[in-house]
Image (cartoon, helix red, strand yellow):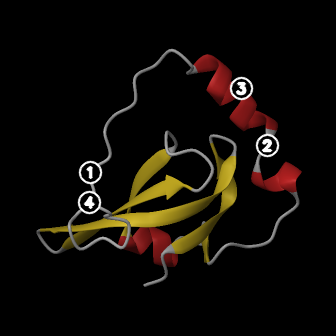
Amino acid sequence: MENFWTSNKTINGLRHFVLVNETREKGKITLLMVSVIDSEIYLKTTYEELMNSGNWQEGWINLPKLQSITEEYVKYKFINKEEEIDEIFINEDSLFNIS
């Protein structure tokens, strides 16, 4: 499966994400996606959502800056500048595990 993805709509103002973790529980695959620009912006999704929803495109689509980093991101960072981030845990077999 491709590790680099572009969201068709912004997620907290950003569109380019990396698949950093995959877990399987009871036959369901859950994926952890992290923004390429800001690791504080991440989401969990299912394999089915990623592949079948029409919300994602494989690879990083070359977009103008104003479409890949929107004003929504600036507002998100301003509102959430004081919040603590959850830790992101990466499986040992993840491409992004560097420890």
Q: Indicate the quadrant containing the C terminus: top left, top right, bottom left or bottom right.
A: bottom left
Residue 17: % across, % down? 56, 61
For mark 4, give the secondary structure.
loop
**Residue matched to label 1:** 89
Where residue 75 is drawn, which disc sits there? 3
The quadrant holding residue 91 is bottom left
For mark 3, give the secondary structure.
helix
Which sits earlier in the primary sequence, circle 4 or circle 1? 1
Q: As shown in the figure, which amino acid type bears the numbered disc 4?
A: Ser
Q: Name the residue rendered at 23%, 74% in the picture.
A: 93
Task: Return the residue found at the far bottom.
Answer: 1
Foreground tag (4 vs 2): 4
Where residue 20 is drawn, which disc sits there? none
The Cα atoms of the two marked residues, 2 and 1, are separated by: 27 Å
For mark 1, give the secondary structure.
loop
Q: Name the residue rendered at 67%, 49% in the picture.
A: 14
Which sits earlier in the primary sequence, circle 1 or circle 3? 3
**Residue matched to label 2:** 70
Q: Would you place residue 92 above or below residue 12 in this image?
A: below
The quadrant holding residue 63 is bottom right
**Residue matched to label 4:** 99
Which sits earlier in the primary sequence, circle 2 or circle 1? 2
Q: Name the residue rendered at 22%, 70% in the picture.
A: 28
Q: Nearer the viewer, residue 49 or 74?
A: 74
The Cα atoms of the two marked residues, 4 and 1, are separated by: 12 Å
User: Seen in the image, is 30 located left or right of residue 64?
Assistant: left
